[in-house]
Image (spheres, rainbow, N blue to C red):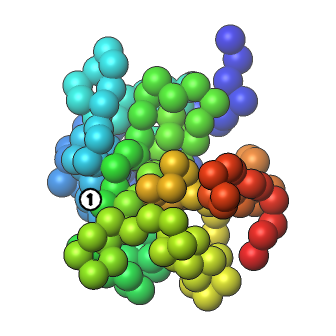
Amino acid sequence: SQSRYTQATPAKCLDIPENAGPTFRLSQFFLLRDLSSGAACARQPGARSGAVVANKGLNRATIICNLRHLAVNSLDPIARHYGRKNMIITSGFRRASNGSDHNIGSAVDIQFLVNGRKANGRELDRIQKHIINELKIPFTQIIHENNSWLHIACRRNGVNSAKRICWWAGGQYNSGYRY
């Protein structure tokens, strides 16, 4: 079937080698493995665990470019504020995630550590609100999932540019523009 995504690698990402390895630097705080094979819950049916592979009509370099965009524009500002050591990337690129920004390299799931323990509930709500209102990072989705982590997506190509915010409250998910 025809993909809705562009195949061509953008000019600003032509420095990404097709064979970029796990230690390829995406940004100040993140290597390729951090958002793929080195993620805490990396899993890739049909491929090396967590390996970045061509997917959804995008070549490998374009997916890595998407991961770079996410890292530079969204994740680095969060790491600067909260400290990289307080961010656990549980999931990054996932080839088998149909309908998800994970499968094009434009999303990650992050657990945050607060005082040495994993944030949840109100702490994640506070972090989500701070990311949106104070850090003002670009995102297409920021979702407080399973009362355990934040899903953050940022698409480089502007597709799905409407911001979607979801949060956990009273035992159920809510969505819209709460903040």
Question: Looking at the image, is 29 positioned above or below residue 22?
Answer: below
Residue 107 appears left or right of 18? right
Residue 177 appears left or right of 157? right
Question: Looking at the image, is 71 positioned above or below residue 52?
Answer: below
- What is the three-letter code of the residue carrying label 1? Leu
Q: Quadrant of residue 91?
A: top left
List x then y, in percent, for residue 64: 41, 46
Residue displayed at 58% across by 25% down: 98
Secondary structure under badge 1? Answer: loop
| Quadrant that contains the N terminus | top right
Residue 19 appears left or right of 61? left
Question: Looking at the image, is 114 positioned above or below residue 61?
Answer: below
Question: Looking at the image, is 118 positioned above or below residue 94?
Answer: below
Q: Nearer the viewer, residue 42 or 2?
A: 42
| Quadrant that contains the C terminus | bottom right
List x then y, in percent, for residue 50: 28, 35
Q: Nearer the viewer, residue 97 or 51?
A: 97
Residue behind mark 1: 31
